[in-house]
């Protein structure tokens, strides 16, 4: 079959969904897998990054099987995912620790302090986004105090869809949509040195992936995937 199709992946908080569409936008097949959320302590919400990747692989394989298509029939892969949170990978592109999700509350004290000091408001004027306990800046600040070894091992910070993109292509990047929740200048859509300094995170600025337009090709599916 020479006809080409589109494959979409959504890495949600509790469910991974994969769909195949034809070029007219009609659904051809659908597959999903539920994801577990670990709450080791009250207010915590973590996820095994490898479990998420395994769920993505299974739903891709199942969607292809249901549709009767081969991987070679897929012309484009698009990925969406939950926002905020924190995913760290090391120099070998392996997870440093479990993902901390957007609904995790452990960094609440960090945000409260920033609000009292006026840091949050000052940051809002640059980024256009208010911080909360699940934002990357707050989580990384919490890790700096409570898990410095995790940050020391980390080579890259990723959002949810960036992790899947990395596993599919071997490439590290994010897009303006997710990056808007990082310390970014919302007008220029670039990371803000001023914001990283304001939040006391300058030492970790290099962890954040390069930003490319949402509709730009981020990579090609590798043979390893």
Image: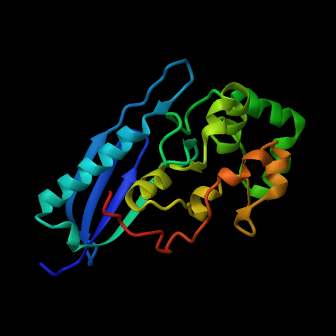
Q: Is residue 65 left or right of residue 80?
A: left
Above or below, 41 against 139 in this view is above
- Toward the viewer: 107 or 27? 107
Picture mark count: 0
Tell me which residue sits at (53%, 59%) in the image: 172
- Toward the viewer: 188 or 57? 57
Q: Residue furthest top?
A: 41
Above or below, 92 against 70 in this view is above
Q: Position of residue 187 (x, y in %)?
A: 75, 68
Q: Is residue 130 left or right of residue 43?
A: right
Q: Position of residue 89 (x, y in %)?
A: 53, 45
- Name the quadrant of the C terminus: bottom left
Image-quadrant location for residue 28: bottom left
Image-quadrant location for residue 19: bottom left
Look at the image and name its color scheme.
Answer: rainbow
Q: Position of residue 40 (x, y in %)?
A: 50, 19
Tell me which residue sits at (54%, 50%) in the image: 159
Q: Is residue 51 left or right of residue 62?
A: right
- Toward the viewer: 136 or 108? 136
Q: Position of residue 67 (x, y in %)?
A: 14, 63
Above or below, 25 against 167 in this view is below
Q: Is residue 48 left or right of residue 18?
A: right
- Name the quadrant of the N terminus: bottom left
Tell me which residue sits at (41%, 62%) in the image: 169
Q: Residue furthest front?
A: 92
Q: Residue furthest bottom?
A: 2
């Amino acid at each position: 079959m020479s006809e080409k199709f589109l494959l979409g992946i959504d890495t949600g908080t509790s469910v991974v969904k994969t769909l195949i569409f034809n070029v007219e936008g009609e659904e051809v097949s659908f597959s999903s897998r539920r994801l577990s959320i670990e709450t080791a302590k009250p207010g915590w919400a973590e996820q095994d990054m490898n479990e998420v990747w395994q769920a993505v692989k299974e739903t891709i394989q199942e969607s292809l099987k249901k549709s009767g298509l081969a991987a070679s029939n897929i012309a484009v892969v698009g990925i969406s995912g939950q926002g905020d949170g924190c995913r760290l990978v090391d120099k070998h592109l392996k997870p440093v620790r479990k993902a901390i999700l957007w609904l995790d509350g452990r960094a609440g004290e960090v945000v409260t302090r920033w609000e009292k000091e006026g840091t949050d408001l000052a940051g809002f004027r640059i980024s256009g986004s208010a911080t909360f306990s699940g934002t990357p800046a707050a989580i990384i600040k919490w890790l700096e105090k409570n898990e410095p070894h995790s940050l020391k091992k980390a080579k890259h910070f990723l959002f949810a869809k960036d992790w899947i993109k990395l596993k599919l292509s071997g490439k590290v990047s994010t897009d303006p949509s997710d990056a808007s929740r990082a310390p970014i200048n919302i007008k220029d859509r670039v990371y803000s040195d001023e914001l990283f300094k304001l939040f006391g995170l300058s030492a970790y600025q290099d962890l954040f992936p390069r930003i490319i337009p949402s509709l730009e090709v981020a990579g090609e599916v590798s043979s390893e995937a």
